[in-house]
Amino acid sequence: MTDHSLVDDALSARNLLPSTPFPSDPRFAPTYPPLSAHEATVEANRCLYCYDAPCIQACPTHIDIPTFIRKIATDNLRGSARTILEANFLGGTCARVCPVEELCEGACVLNAQEKPIAIGRLQRHAVDHAQERGLQLFQPAAPTGRRVAVVGSGPAGISVSAELAKLGHSVTLLEKRELGGGLSTYGIIVLREPVEVSLREVEAVRALGVDVQTGYELTDQAGLNALLADHDAVFLGLGLGAVPAMGIPGEEHLLDGLTYIEHSKLHPELLPQAQQVVVIGAGNTAIDAATIARRRGADVTMLYRRTEAEMTAYRHEYEFALSEGIGYRFLTQPVRVLSEGGRVTGVECVKMVLGVPDPGGRPTPRPLPGSEFTVPCDAVIKAIGQEKPSLAIALGLDVAGGYIVVNETMQTNLPRVYAGGDCVRLRGSASTVMAVQDGKYAAAAIHRQLSGMFSSESLETAHG
């Protein structure tokens, strides 16, 4: 049974409660239902408990997967959840949103013989057991007297906050929006993660003594200096910006993909009642937006200027979209949104051909003259990526390719300032699990820094 009390309390307190409880809509039931106790035990007993388990190495947070599965098999769900959350404090979110097909399950040795162990669903089974019951699996260490400010309560921010709190440091977690959780709360469709799952993780970090403050926005270097004056270290989990403008006529009629997903979770009554929807883009966010539109009964077509081979979405997400009845038009570039009387009627497009590789190695698309055509529709959603964190330059941080530059310990060019999550992901895959690991790396580095302060102060005292 799903407990919506956290959602109700958090949203109603800020007048944000949806007029219709979206998660209860059968069209948006979880892609995979929760395992029953019997199903979980049977699945756990399939595991070979490999000595040098490749699934552990494939997990960016290195959860001891065979151990947590063995504990499920022996009906020790509390112990299983603890094993997971020790390595990944956002184990509930990651159990739902991680690309397990590419990571742990993809590395499972049983792939060669039959189907892999359902690691993600087993992880969800254990973590949900603990979090739905409010079990407190961790306690903070004795207070160290050191203070850390964390800006941004997405996966990286919650991860670093939890790890530092467990070490005894005083942590203030600052979030500019009304609810904590970042992308997990606002940007992951309810089929994968209902709002209450991410809010449970916010409550879990609060239970460790972290002071979670919403409605705070860092806007300039003066604000960062003020945080540094009051804290021993600052961690920045700024995420990314809005979906960029396309610069085409009729752009004012485009729906922002991230806003569309947010409304689908919190205010479904704000979504347009469209029958023919076009989604521009072919990444995971684009597929999520297309899935919502499709589940609401629309015919959905995705437009992408390159081919299937260059899509940024995971292969299993692409196949999922096809199974939902979502159509694709590759080598297609929108050039104008058509409308009559303020209502969208279609998208004018041009066919593309691929040329020489760009700096990232993908072939550059160019328009094919005389190939214009129109795709009829009554709503258009753009999901073409997100803008880089423009705030970084205002804060005096070094950037590369628009992303914040950090070293192997997640430290920026500024003393006592660290960063992690999507805002530093110049290379590699931007994902929740990578953001969690960033938070762990940063927490370890900040703890070393603060421990060094202890040593320096001890020496000063000794030599009085």
Image (spheres, helix red, strand yellow):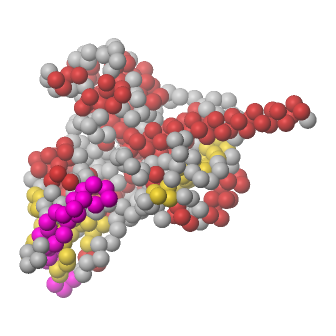
Horizontal side of residue 107 vs 396, given as left or right: left
Q: Nearer the viewer, residue 268 or 372?
A: 372
Q: Residue at x 81, y 32 (%)?
A: 458
The residues colored magenta run 340-367
Q: Quadrant of residue 345?
A: bottom left
Q: Is residue 338 visible?
A: yes
Q: Residue 146 versus residue 421: which sits nearer the camera?
A: 421
Residue occupying the far bottom of the picture: 341
Q: Would you place residue 103 above or below residue 361 in this image?
A: above
Residue 433 on image: x %, y %: 39, 40
- Identify which residue is drawn at 32% across, 59% down: 359
The structure residue drawn at horizontal position 56% and vertical position 39%, both measured from the top left corner, is 443
Q: In the shown orientation, is residue 162 left or right of residue 44?
A: right
Magenta stretch: includes residue 349 = yes
**Where does residue 14 sit, x and y in percent of width and height?**
47, 59
Q: Is residue 246 above or below residue 184?
A: below
Query: x and y percent of residue 373 in the render?
Result: 8, 75
Residue 335: quarter of image: bottom left
Residue furthest to the front? 356
Q: For this view, does 225 lie left or right of residue 398?
A: right
Chief secondary structure of the magenta span? strand
Residue 336 vertical placement versus 233 (above, below): below
Which of the 4 quarters of the picture holds residue 272?
A: bottom left
